[in-house]
Amino acid sequence: MEEWDVYDRHRVKTGKVVPRGSALRPDEFHLVVHVCFINAQNQMLIQQRQPFKEGWPNRWDVTVGGSAQAGEDSPLAAERELHEEIGYSVDFSQYRPIFTIHFTNGFDDYYLVNAEVDLVQLRLQPSEVKQVKWADKEEIMGLIRRQEFIPYHRSVIELIFDMAQGRGAYLS
């Protein structure tokens, strides 16, 4: 059974470990990671979730994402999710998230990887990923409008694509 480390509001592990999906108190949090691949054509590698997947079945999503397991830090969770879901390996030890979104009972770290990936070389996890493709920002926004993509705030998708053009809060 998968387990989560529990964090306090300052993102410090409390030492408590709970089964995945456990109800957390208002002062307890868990860690989620997302990895977004952007290619030289300014397209994001997106995945379609399996129709039998719990939570957003058959919807498109960013490259990969999921909860950190007990004992993992954010970069290690990003590495594992990437390898599990699409069979691709990246050493995240020198990466930092491009941003973190705080949500009820959690922290969601977003990583950005500029990469050229041959889709034929990927090994999709049959229990989670139906298919993958490259899509530009406009296509993703259309998928969101048609409710075919997980309903991220449009500003999150905009920020990912903006950050792919140059890291930091200011234009280059």
Image: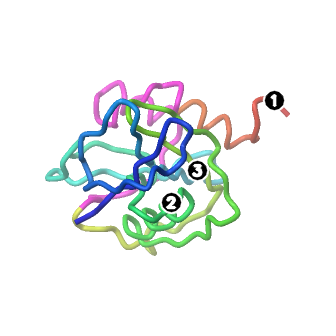
Residue 147 position within the rendered picture, expressed as x and y whole percent measured from the top left = 28, 29
Q: Position of residue 94 (x, y in %)?
A: 70, 63
Task: Tell me residue 72's x, y (percent).
Answer: 48, 63
Local secondary structure at mark 3: strand
Cα distance between the residues tagged 1 and 2: 27 Å
Work out whether residue 60 or residue 102 is closer to the camera in this orientation and state it: 102
Q: Dividing the image into 4 quarters, which one contains the N terminus?
A: bottom left
**For the residues bearing labels 2 and 3, Cβ distance under 8 angstroms:** yes
Q: Nearer the viewer, residue 149 or 112?
A: 112
Foreground: 12 or 46?
A: 12
Marked residue nearer the N-terminal end (2 or 3): 2
Q: Secondary structure at mark 1?
A: loop
Residue extending furthest front?
15
Q: Amino acid at mark 2?
A: Ala
Tell whether position 138 is magenta.
yes
Q: For marks 2 and 3, give the CA distance.
A: 8 Å
Badge 3 or badge 1: first in the primary sequence: 3
Please name whichever residue, 104 or 140, is drawn nearer the observer in this view of the structure: 104
Pick whichever of labels 1 and 2 is earlier in the sequence. 2
Outermost residue on the left side: it is: 52
Bin the neighbour count of mark 3 within 10 Å (Cα to Cα): few under 14, some 14-19, many 20 and up.
Answer: many
Give the crowd class for mark 2: few <14, some 14-19, many >=20 residues within 10 Å. Answer: many
Q: Which residue is mark 3?
A: 111
Q: Residue at x 22, y 46 (%)?
A: 58
Residue 146, above or below 160? above
- Identify the residue position indicated by label 2 in the image: 78
Look at discs 3 and 1 and give the one toward the viewer.
3
Q: Which residue is at 40% across, 66% downward?
A: 86
Task: Describe residue 93's horizontal placement relative to residue 70 as left or right.
Answer: right
User: From which residue to which does the magenta span run?
Assistant: 128-156
Residue hosting label 1: 171
